[in-house]
Amino acid sequence: MPWFRWDGEDLVLQVRIQPRASRNALAGVVGNYLKVRITAPPLEGRANAQLIAFVAKQFGTAKGQVRLLQGEKARTKVVRVEAPTRIPPGLAIRLPGAGSPDRR
């Protein structure tokens, strides 16, 4: 699977997180993953909770519209973003209906 795909109006991302980073940030695409830096430690689900909140903010959705599909205890995860309203700068993704056939 490439690092992202569209499933109807939802965006499914393959993510690799770096917990305990100095700041939350999208670190670009590395191989088949979107690298995300998270300040939270990987303890008691804190990194997952922060990942969900950060992804929701970046893609313009509510936290309830971001779901962790796979990788609860792993650094590599699959995340579903329900009907994102924006794409963060620097990512080569277009919203559905934005004019380019980037839907995969």
Image (cartoon, rainbow, N blue to C red):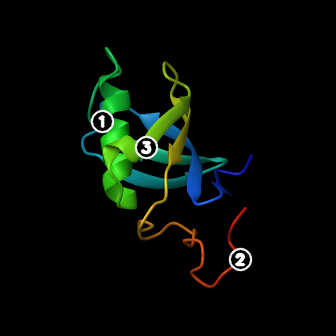
Q: What residue is rendered at 40% in x and 53% in y?
A: 26
Which callout, 2 or 3, points at the residue further toward the start of the chain? 3
Q: What residue is rendered at 57% in x and 68% in y?
A: 93
Image quadrant of residue 57?
bottom left
Check disc 3 and report the residue beneath it. 66
Asked if the residue under mark 2 is in contact with the one under mark 1, i.e. CB atoms within 8 Å, the reply is no
Q: CA distance from mark 3 to mark 1?
A: 11 Å
Q: Measuring from the top left, give residue 25's x and y in whole percent.
A: 34, 51
Give the number of the mark in front: 1 or 2.
Answer: 2
Which mark identifies residue 101?
2
Q: Amino acid at mark 2?
A: Pro
10 Å crowding of disc 1: few (<14), some (14-19), many (20+): some
Q: Amino acid at mark 1?
A: Gln
Depth order, front residue of 62/55 = 62
Q: CA distance from mark 1 to mark 2?
A: 31 Å
Q: Is residue 63 above or below residue 86?
A: above
Q: CA distance from mark 2 to mark 3?
A: 24 Å
Q: Amino acid at mark 3?
A: Val
Q: Measuring from the top left, give residue 43's x and y in whole percent.
A: 32, 16
Q: Is residue 101 left or right of residue 91?
A: right
Q: Measuring from the top left, give residue 15's x and y in whole percent.
A: 53, 42
Q: What residue is rendered at 57% in x and 69% in y?
A: 92
